Amino acid sequence: ASAAATRLLEKYPDVEARFAPGGWSGWRAFFLQRIHDLAAAISASVPEIFAGRMNWARQSFVSRSIPDQDLCSGLECLGDVLTVELPDYAAAAVAPVLAAAMASLQRPLPDEASRLDGNTETGRAALQYLVAAIEGDSRGAISGVVETVDNGLSLDQVYSEVMMAVQWELGRMWHAGELSIAQEHLVTTTTQRLMAVLSFRTTPASPNGRRVVLAGVSGDVHDVALRALADLFESYGWHSICLGSDLPDTEIAAASDYFVADLLLLSATLPQHLEGVEKTILALKELEDRTIPVIVGGTAYRSADDLLRRQGADGYAPDFGSALALAEELLSRSQGDA
């Protein structure tokens, strides 16, 4: 990463001028993250993972009026360094992944527009919640959502179409340079408080006798969606056990065994977290006399949803509704087999 940053700023003085001062440190951090992404793509044999992360970075560059050519120059310099530094067999594995990413940077960038629609009931609720939370009125933001629930909005709609829609919008706004890190943390903290309030204001369905364990794999610190999904499972009568985020594979497996889980849901946000999923599934298989179906989810699978079969997972859920439906399907299937 250091060598790539040095090469970039030496080879392209205009890039150095645009990013001064502190350009070298910023590019070094950028290259370090991209090397992690590259390793994850090669390990998973899914080149699209790296191309997807490069285009994620591209959207951030565009929002800050940084020319695409800087990103292409950076990728070129990273490739130059890796060709020299890596052994031949590793360089051969890297080259096609870098080429695919460079080709993707030549294509038009899709418009990442807001998903919040003020013409719908849930869209209006989401916008009102977001504005109140950003302005520091956490109590008002929470009260507004609670009122919509009291007026008949279902927990499924609140979680999927209000809270998670707002979390997605936060990511979009931060990526586009429209939001500070402090504002993003403020809204996320408000959402965590809101979930605690809602979990005790809704009446769950009768217990169905099933247990689901939810966890974020090692290195993944994102858990808002995981906790929201745990609440939804509970509302449908499941005994829901949310372990939280950033857990070692052996701990997740041991907890799934201890709680006699009927199902395990694993979340992976970034490409480098995919290895943690695979290790956790392997640890599960080492349990004696226990077979626990596994559903995977998270943004790491946006470009690699076919990877789950090679990892040994039983299904992939891109959203809450899919997770709930797939859980029912998997357990009904296993009971039928039994």
Image (tube, grey):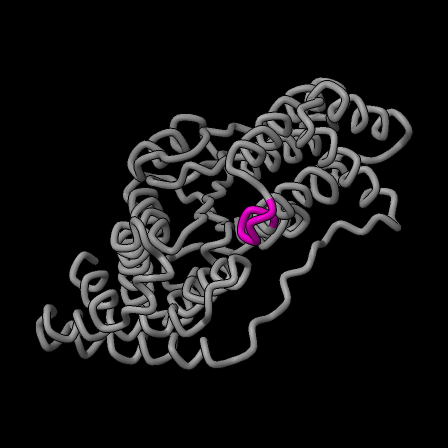
- Could you tell me if residue 336 is visible in this image? no
Seen in the image, is 7 located left or right of residue 216? left
> How many numbered discs?
0
Q: Image quarter for residue 203?
A: top right
Could you tell me which residue is drawn at 21 percent across and 58 percent down?
Answer: 1
Q: Does 145 sit above or below residue 74?
A: above
Seen in the image, is 6 located left or right of residue 322? left
- Could you tell me if residue 48 is visible in this image? yes
Q: Image quarter for residue 240?
A: top right
**Is residue 241 inside the magenta stretch?**
no
Seen in the image, is 152 located left or right of residue 237? right
Q: Does 90 sit above or below residue 314?
A: below
Q: As rendered, which of 192 and 119 lies closer to the eye? A: 119
Could you tell me which residue is drawn at 45 percent across and 76 percent down?
Answer: 105
Residue 119's x, y, as percent?
Answer: 88, 50
**Is residue 177 inside the magenta stretch?**
yes
Q: Does 115 sit above or below residue 261?
A: below
